[in-house]
Image (cartoon, rainbow, N blue to C red):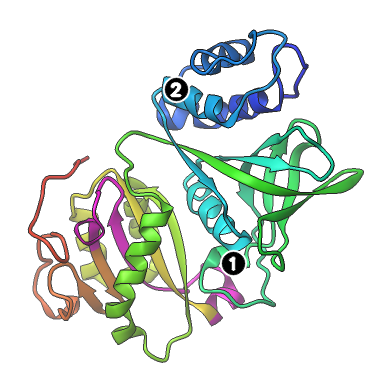
Amino acid sequence: MSQDGVVSTCSTTSLFSIISCLEAKFNLNKLTSHKITLIANKIDKRSRNFPSAGLSYQQMMNFFTEIQLHPLYYSNMDSKTAKGVIYSYIENGIPALANLKFPQKTARHAVVIVGHSVSSTKTQRGLYVSDYIGHFIVHDDQRGPYTILQFDESSNDCRIRLIFDGGSDEGIIESVIVPLPEFVNFDHTKVMEALSFMNTYLKIYLSGRDIIFRVFLTTSNDFKSYVADDLGFAQYPLFQNAYLSYRMPRHIWLIEICDRRKYLEKGYKDCVIGELIIDATGFHTKEAILIARVEENFANGNLNQRFVEIKKPPKIRSLFLPPREIQII
């Protein structure tokens, strides 16, 4: 979909693209560009609805709130942080709306980030899988679908290059908006805080290992489907059976602990040596961490417990605090 300058502008077409992606996932109603403009202007109306003069960041946030989604707003990020934030959500099929600024242009521009390259940038070092992503894929109503977005890793701000048929443009990502479903209270920032907290315990088992982390939001159903089908889990039947039988919150953050060499050589195949599972519906870091595993070392209440040495899986509870009621699927 492209803008017509009367009913829809780049912001409206970006919202239309996101709703089209999320209709089935979040059970949303189909909306026309006309209806999107009206909803977005319902609060914080700055001009007449049509011809549309475009939407502000706040109006786009208001639009998501009006259709019962819960948007997150990220700004003042460097390239590395922005890549991590965007990657963590689009891996779950949730597009990210990026607000761009181009040199010598006063008007801002909105695009939708929907995917990333499979091939990795293997010449650099990084602690996260997102650091190795070569480029992201965006829908741009001016430059066309499947436009390539590359980050300038050498810049301190969030400089990017858009590559499309016929040329390229350079700009800066000023902010990113991510629409989330209800009950997802833990965002990427809190997850990184949880990982930093857990590093104190993980380094006991990761000493001397060259590892990277893959951080992304997912659902417990998707995670269990992966566990059931993955051959890597088959060699640890107690882990596999326990994960499949545990009752988890619907939304979880998954931090996969990967062997860097294997990842660079084979991608995701056979590179995962452990994971952290975090309750995305939680509020507090210690309370939200559900499970920590590194190979055969497992903790969900006793950080030194070896999972394979017990006869049956223990009941899942918080690592650090007494059990609490959580949203159960």
Residue lying farthest to the right in this orientation: 166
Quarter of the figure with the N terminus: top right
Q: What is the x, y in percent for residue 117?
A: 66, 56
Q: Which residues are magenta?
A: 261-290
* Dots 2, 1 in contact, CB < 8 A: no
Image location of residue 269, percent across then percent down: 51, 69
* Residue 171 coordinates in the image, percent (x, y): 76, 48
- As drawn, is 245 to the left or to the right of 119? left
Crowd band around label 2 with a 10 angstrom C-alpha radius: few (<14), some (14–19), many (20+):
some
Name the image quarter holding residue 291. bottom left
Image height of 204 relative to 106, above or below: below
Residue 295 in view, yes or no:
no
Residue 325 placement, left or right of 84: left
Relative to the observer, which residue lies in front, 141 or 119? 141
Dot 2: element: loop
- The circle on residue 131 is 1
Q: Is residue 168 magenta?
A: no
The residue positioned 54% from the left and 66% from the top of the image is 129
Q: Is residue 253 left or right of residue 244?
A: right
Distance, label 2 to label 1, CA atoms, is 33 Å
Residue 61 visible in the displayed image = yes
Find out whether residue 271 is within the magenta segment.
Answer: yes
Q: Residue at x 20, y 69 (%)?
A: 238
Q: At 24% across and 68% down in the image, what residue appears?
A: 239
Closer to the camera in the image, 24 or 292 = 292
- For label 2, the residue is 28
